[in-house]
Amino acid sequence: MAERIQRLMMAGMISLGLILYQTGFKWGLYVDWFVVFMVIVWAVTGFCPSLYVLKKSGMPSETE
């Protein structure tokens, strides 16, 4: 469950960044690049801060 919520949050943040950029806020791209950077960190290290927070808040995980 935590993994699905994390993926929804990631998609929402990317969408928000693109919407902000398209409406004239140039820093919307920074939101997208931050998400991309965190996905790369997750791929390389296996650690995702949002998953960590979701699991610590009591959300059940698919890997447990």
Image: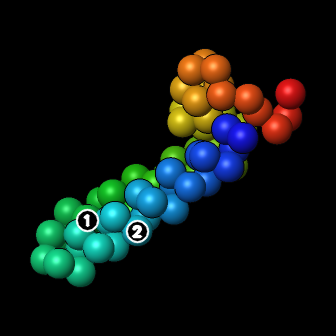
Horizontal relation, residue 4 to residue 33: left or right:
right
Estimate the x, y position of residue 17 in percent, counting from the top left. 32, 65
Estimate the x, y position of residue 14 in percent, counting from the top left. 43, 64
Horizontal relation, residue 13 to residue 24: left or right:
right
- Colour setup of the view: rainbow
Residue at the image position 13 percent from the left and 77 percent from the top: 24
Q: Residue furthest right?
A: 64
Which quadrant, please, contains the C terminus?
A: top right
Q: Residue furthest left?
A: 24
20 and 61: which is toward the camera? 61
Residue at the image position 58 percent from the left and 30 percent from the top: 54
Helix, strand, or loop for circle 1? helix
Q: Badge 1 is on which residue? A: 28
Q: Badge 2 is on which residue? A: 15
Q: Amino acid at mark 1?
A: Gly
13 and 41: which is toward the camera? 13
Which quadrant, please, contains the N terminus?
A: top right
Q: Mark 2 and mark 1: span between their CA atoms? A: 10 Å
